[in-house]
Image (cartoon, rainbow, N blue to C red):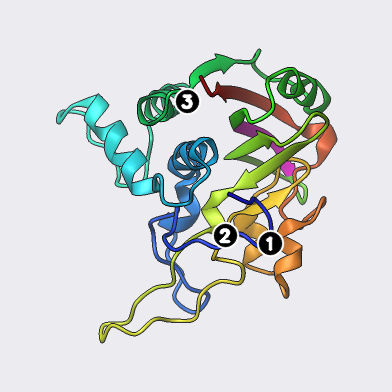
């Protein structure tokens, strides 16, 4: 599976429909379940491997009927979401999870990620500033070769909304594949303002975290 502008998804990793003229907030709030599904897609190299709905349903099953979650959530806390993401990815693949130290700077996180085997998929929880505002986000990353880490955001891979008569509203630009960058970013921020798909695959984007503010918690998934 390519993780660049040529990526074409026959199905959508982000299960929640949204269109520019008919936005749906839940499609911007399910980054944890999108990263869980994205980890499975990266490891299996197919966009058909998992969806955010699959991941959220799995998390609800772990909690039991007395602890209800919204349809798109992976848990009530970052810690619970990371545990449930890890359980989902390792259950759906033959990968082994490896946890990095918490609250790493971007240089330290990159160094740790580059110490893992080529082909390792990552789930990253990022805290920092985006356009001067404190933000947090779950997304994926992949060690593509000996020297490179590519951050991948499957949340932007979302279907357009459907009208009551079954027609589709116009989709968001670049919705047919994940957004990518060389550093942590929020793909839907770029997607909602982009004028070309190239903006969704740029080293620095409108949705990029300010690098000096970034703290990351990273889990690597290594194929067996």
Q: Residue 126: within the magenta?
A: yes
**Mark 1 sits on what residue?**
5
Query: Is 76 on the left-hand or right-hand side of 194?
Result: left
Query: Is 114 on the left-hand or right-hand side of 7?
Result: right
Residue 157 location in percent, x, y?
52, 59
Residue drawn at (75%, 64%), measured in percent from left and top?
199
**Mark 3 sits on what residue?**
82
**Mark 2 sits on what residue?**
177
Q: Is residue 132 above or below residue 12?
A: above
**Depth check, front residue: 213 or 199:** 199
Disc 2 secondary structure class: loop
Counting residues from the start of the chain, the first of labels 3 and 2 encountered is 3
Disc 1 secondary structure class: loop
Residue drawn at (56%, 15%), measured in percent from left and top?
98
Pointers 3 and 2 in contact (CB under 8 A)?
no
Closest to the camera, between mark 3 and mark 2, is 2
Pointers 1 and 2 in contact (CB under 8 A)?
yes
For disc 3, the neighbor class at 10 Å (few under 14, some 14 to 19, many from 20) is: many
Disc 3 secondary structure class: helix
Counting residues from the start of the chain, the first of labels 3 and 1 encountered is 1
Location of residue 60 by image quarter? top left
Range shown magenta: 123-129
Q: Main secondary structure of the magenta part?
A: strand
Closest to the camera, between mark 3 and mark 1, is 1
Q: Is residue 144 above or below residue 108?
A: below
Query: Is 22 on the left-hand or right-hand side of 174?
Result: left
Residue drawn at (54%, 40%), measured in percent from left and top?
42
For disc 1, the neighbor class at 10 Å (few under 14, some 14 to 19, many from 20) is: some
């Amino acid at each position: 599976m390519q993780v660049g502008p040529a990526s074409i998804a026959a199905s959508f990793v982000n299960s929640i429909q949204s269109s520019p003229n008919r936005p749906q907030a839940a499609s911007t709030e399910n980054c944890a379940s999108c990263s869980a599904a994205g980890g499975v897609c990266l490891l299996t190299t197919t966009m058909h491997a998992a969806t955010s709905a699959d991941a959220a349903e799995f998390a609800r099953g772990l909690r039991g009927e007395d602890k209800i979650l919204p349809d798109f959530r992976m848990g009530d806390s970052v810690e619970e979401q990371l545990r449930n993401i890890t359980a989902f990815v390792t259950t759906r693949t033959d990968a082994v999870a490896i946890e990095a130290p918490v609250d790493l700077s971007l240089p330290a996180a990159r160094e740790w990620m580059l110490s893992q085997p080529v082909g390792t998929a990552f789930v990253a929880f990022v805290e920092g500033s985006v356009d001067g505002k404190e933000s947090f986000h779950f997304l994926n990353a992949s060690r593509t070769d000996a020297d490179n880490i590519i951050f991948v955001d499957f949340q932007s891979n979302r279907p357009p909304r459907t009208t009551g008569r079954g027609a589709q509203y116009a989709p968001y630009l670049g919705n047919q594949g994940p957004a990518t960058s060389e550093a942590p970013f929020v793909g839907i921020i770029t997607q909602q303002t982009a004028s070309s798909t190239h903006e969704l695959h740029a080293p620095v984007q409108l949705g990029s975290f300010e690098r000096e503010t970034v703290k990351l918690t990273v889990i690597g998934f290594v194929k067996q």
